[in-house]
Image: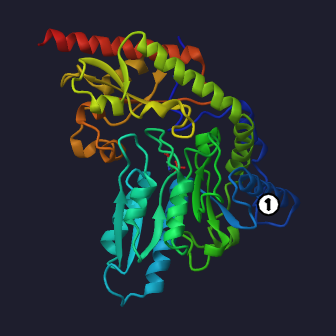
């Protein structure tokens, strides 16, 4: 049986053998808060890991507090909730409705969106503005700037989007936020960019950031919350306890953290070659598809007067192979128009899975429009494109043979659906 072609690396990545081995190496070291030698060894490892993250994302530990969490969901919740609760406490309960304001991109991960949507219903002092991306999936700094208000206390914009791979210019967004008011807390979820492309939190004037290590070949359940030290006052923990300097109670997951450290070092040391590999494979994928079917980018598709019956649309624009604008290993494709009501991306995904090729769907074709991916909806994509969306996400270990298997399975199913739709006309 063919091995699995795993092309769903934005969902999670696989752990190389040496990372798995680190899970064993860090087992049975005792409680990291204790004073015996093996506990101290754990403390030293965690401090070295913090310093390594500080150097790798330009958030040095003397300026940023780096706290281990159970993943980016917790880190996002800790920071966003912490800043909102602080604003609420500062303004006071007696203050008028809408006394403080939060701006967030509409394409954030659900760990932020669901929290914000819940808090805005429960906190009368809070008002909330979402900023939509352009049709290429990017949040524009000028749109972000327009949403800011004198009462804005928190601005949230992710670095790279998990579905489209679009990379936001957080340096420019951070600049407009701080130019508007230096006191606005700027939070950026860097889960999909850290380890894949260069990240510089200092340059982007970021006050808070979240990282998740299972996206870079570490184990699931380990992440960090990065918070600028000058912003720490008044931010309460989600979990009370004495560990992690009181920022996050609970015995640290040293087994996972030790393995995450090894994975992060490995992934970052390979980053230049991974970028080159992924970019090469992405260009190859596009070129090979174009040998068999018309391929276009969404901006061109949107402005074309006539839409072809069978056509593969890349969600993005001509910068899709430019690492400044899109993650090198991510591409979202949609085969459009010919998809009849009974034929859809879920079927393509299932057929690929039968051939042991794993990808994900942007949003299932047979869902009602409110269930379409919030990212694709925020981009204002037409239903026919959303219905066909398939995400391919590679990593530094992806091979051309895996990409070939995707191309074969994808085209076979697209053509089969096309024939059925033609026959039924
Ligand atoms: N933010 C983004 C952009 C993600 O892609 C994910 C993972 O899907 C998360 C946050 C949540 O990370 P975790 O699985 O560590 O909670």
Q: Is residue 377 left or right of residue 252?
A: left
Question: Where does residue 350 sit, x and y in percent of width and height?
Answer: 36, 22
Residue extending farthest to the right is 37
Residue extending farthest to the bottom is 94
Residue 74 in view of the camera: no
Q: Is residue 124 left or right of residue 383?
A: right
Question: Where does residue 231 sit, x and y in percent of width and height?
Answer: 61, 74
Question: Where does residue 394 sit, x and y in percent of width and height?
Answer: 55, 29
Residue 298 higher or lower than 29, as above or below: above
Q: Is mark 1 within 8 Å of ligand 1?
A: no
Residue 126 in view of the camera: yes
Q: Residue at x 56, y 33 (%)?
A: 328
Question: Where does residue 109 sit, x and y in percent of width and height?
Answer: 44, 51
Tell me where residue 311 sits by quadrant: top left
Q: Residue at x 53, y 56 (%)?
A: 172
Q: Which residue is mark 1?
A: 43
Q: How many marks?
A: 1
Q: Nearer the viewer, residue 123 or 282?
A: 282
Tell me where residue 119 sits by quadrant: bottom left
Residue 160 higher or lower than 395, as above or below: below
Q: Residue at x 76, y 52 (%)?
A: 52
Residue 169 higher or lower than 348, as above or below: below
């Amino acid at each position: 049986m063919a091995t699995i072609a795993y092309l769903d690396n934005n969902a999670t990545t696989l752990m190389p053998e040496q990372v798995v081995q680190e899970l064993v190496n860090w087992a049975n070291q005792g409680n990291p808060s204790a004073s015996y030698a093996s506990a101290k060894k754990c403390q030293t490892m965690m401090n070295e890991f913090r310093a390594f993250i500080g150097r790798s994302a330009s958030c040095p530990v003397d300026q940023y507090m780096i706290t281990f969490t159970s993943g980016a969901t917790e880190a996002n919740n800790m920071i966003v909730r912490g800043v909102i609760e602080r604003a609420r406490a500062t303004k006071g309960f007696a203050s008028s409705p809408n006394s403080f304001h939060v701006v967030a991109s509409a394409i954030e991960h659900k760990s932020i969106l669901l929290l914000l949507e819940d808090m805005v219903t429960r906190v009368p002092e809070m008002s909330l503005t979402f900023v939509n991306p352009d049709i290429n999936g990017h949040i524009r700094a000028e749109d972000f700037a327009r949403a800011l208000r004198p009462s804005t206390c928190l601005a949230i914009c992710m670095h790279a989007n998990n579905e489209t791979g679009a990379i936001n210019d957080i340096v420019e967004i951070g600049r407009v936020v701080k130019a508007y008011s230096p006191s606005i807390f700027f939070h950026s979820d860097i889960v999909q960019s850290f380890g894949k492309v260069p990240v510089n939190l200092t340059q982007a004037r970021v006050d808070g950031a979240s990282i998740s290590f299972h996206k870079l070949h570490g184990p699931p359940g380990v992440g960090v919350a990065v918070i600028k030290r000058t912003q720490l006052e008044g931010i309460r923990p989600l979990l009370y306890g004495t560990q992690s300097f009181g920022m996050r109670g609970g015995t640290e997951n040293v087994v996972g953290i030790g393995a995450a450290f090894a994975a992060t070092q490995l992934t970052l040391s390979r980053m230049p070659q991974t970028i080159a590999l992924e970019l090469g494979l992405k260009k190859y994928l596009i070129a090979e598809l174009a040998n068999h079917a018309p391929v276009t980018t969404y901006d061109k598709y949107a402005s074309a007067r006539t839409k072809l019956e069978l056509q593969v649309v890349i969600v993005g624009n001509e910068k899709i192979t430019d690492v400044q604008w899109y993650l090198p290993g991510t591409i979202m494709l949609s085969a459009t128009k010919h998809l009849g009501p009974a034929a859809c991306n879920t079927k393509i995904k299932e057929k690929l899975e039968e051939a042991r090729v794993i990808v994900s769907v942007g949003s299932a074709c047979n869902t009602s429009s409110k269930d379409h991916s919030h990212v694709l909806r925020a981009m204002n994509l037409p239903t026919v494109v959303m219905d066909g969306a398939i995400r391919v996400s590679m990593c530094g270990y992806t091979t051309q043979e895996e990409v070939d298997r995707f191309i074969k399975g994808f085209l076979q199913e697209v053509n089969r659906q096309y024939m059925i739709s033609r026959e039924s006309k």
